[in-house]
Image (cartoon, rainbow, N blue to C red):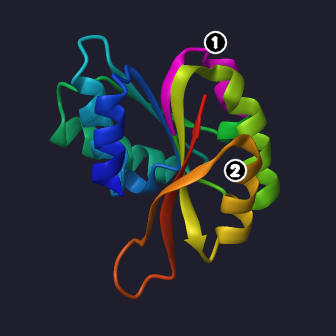
Amino acid sequence: ICMVLHALALANDARVIVETGVNNGAGATLWLALAASAQPDGHYHGIDIDTAASERAKKACSEILPNAHCTFYKADAATALPTLFQPKTIDFLFVDDDHRRAHVEEEIKAFLPLMRPGGLMLFHDVIGTHEGDVWETIKPYGGMRIVDTFHSPGCNFGGLGVIKA
């Protein structure tokens, strides 16, 4: 999933990349920060409601990618991102925080106006445990599954879905 996200961000010439739910920097964070750093004016933004997770992700990013432009926020993405970004300014958004249907719906409504035309909103866990919440929520917005596999053997969730702005 991380390498697919990286490739999609590069192919989309993403300069402003945002990730919700930074997973301590152990998941997509470094791949997305690397993709942002491929652009001269690229910038990665990670947001997580967990202060410790944000701090660990920040530390990992600064140690492994010291030249990458990364900013981390401790906040609920659904309420914070509309105050942090102007409309039509986010090129690439990876949503991987709260997977409950109501929250995913709230995020889509809050984030779509922030996406530049042609920008990509990616959603994790569109199959398996969270399928009903994530997949059924993104479908009405033209969402489609682009990676329909599990994370790894033994996991019962994963996959990747996309909404194109």
Coordinates of residue 2 in the picture (x, y in percent): 33, 53
Classify residue 110 as left or right of residue 149: right
Q: Residue 147: which numbered mark, if any?
A: none
Give the class, few, some or many, for how many residues have Cα within 10 Å of label 2's Cα (few <14, many ≥20): many
Eyeballing the image, is 84 above or below 164? above
Name the residue beneath numbered marker 2: 138
Q: Type of residue at label 2? A: Ile
Residue at 23 percent across and 12 percent down: it is 40
Eyeballing the image, is 50 above or below 121? below
Q: Type of residue at label 1? A: Gln
- Quarter of the picture containing the N terminus is bottom left
Inspect the magenta stretch and tell me whether residue 71 lies in it.
Answer: no
**Over which residues does the magenta segment extend?**
79-93
Name the residue beneath numbered marker 1: 86
Coordinates of residue 160 in the picture (x, y in percent): 49, 57
Query: What's the CA distance linking mark 1 and mark 2?
Result: 23 Å
Give the class, few, some or many, for how many residues have Cα within 10 Å of label 1's Cα (few <14, many ≥20): few
SS of the residue under disc 1: loop
Classify residue 164 as left or right of residue 133: left
Q: Which residue lies furthest to the right in this view?
A: 102
